[in-house]
Amino acid sequence: MAARMIDRVEGQGKLGTITASNISYYTIQHCKSGRRANGTSSVDIMGSSTQLNGTSRLHSLNEVVAEDETGCEIFELQDVLSNDNEDPAAVAGRKLDWDRFLDQLSHVEQLVIEFLSAGKTLRDVARQVGLSDSAMQGYRRKIAVKVLEFMGVEILGDIAHEPSWRINLDCTRAGQACRYERRAMAMA
């Protein structure tokens, strides 16, 4: 940035009248206002110009975001971002939906879900209730249809879809891990 200023002053023929302290002063002022040596974008979220305009804010990861009611435990921003647990509201909502769905099923259908959730097979359910394997396949198909009717077709996409904020966080973590490994290999 300073070199560009000197080149401009030289092009104007004023190189002898402007001192080095003038160049350094104005270079510092430009840096403070958010100018970059290789660009003048004010949409750079880390740029001071963007922060001065008020269009972005920089927060410390040590910033307190919540405290429990007793005041014993403090939650910082870094704790919230590094928490890999699912959103408690989503878990509670899903549990309410699931409980309501299970109430609509027959006893055999509830057993099918219970056994499959426990890692057992349809054959185990068939032995328990005294039905054939093909009858159990029929129950499995009925449950699949009932799930789609109760929760909607988009439920399959919702289950498979990971939130974009988590994808971004995972990508950032993976990039940092790669950088750390490369630096460790370079040091060795």
Image (cartoon, helix red, strand yellow):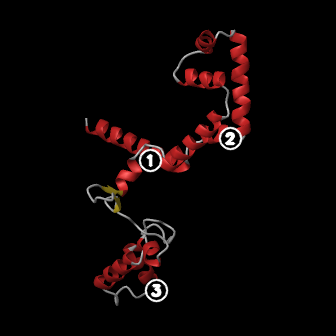
Residue type at the position of mark 2: Met
Secondary structure of the residue carrying numbered label 1 = helix
Residue bearing the label numbered 1:
172
Q: Position of residue 46 (x, y in %)?
A: 42, 65
**Mark 2 and mark 3 residues within 8 Å of each other at the beta carbon:** no
Residue type at the position of mark 3: Gln
Q: Earlier in the sequence, mark 2 or mark 3?
A: 3
Q: Residue at x 36, y 78 (%)?
A: 27
Residue bearing the label numbered 2:
151
> Front-most of 34 and 28?
34
Residue 63 is labelled as none
Secondary structure of the residue carrying numbered label 3 = helix
Picture quarter containing residue 1?
bottom left
> Front-most of 72 and 4?
72
Considering only vertical position in the picture, is 146 above or below 140?
below
Mark 1 → mark 3, Cα distance in angstroms: 47 Å
Q: Nearer the viewer, mark 1 or mark 3?
A: 1
Residue bearing the label numbered 3:
12
Q: Position of residue 87 (x, y in %)?
A: 48, 48
Residue type at the position of mark 1: Thr
> Front-most of 170 and 134?
134
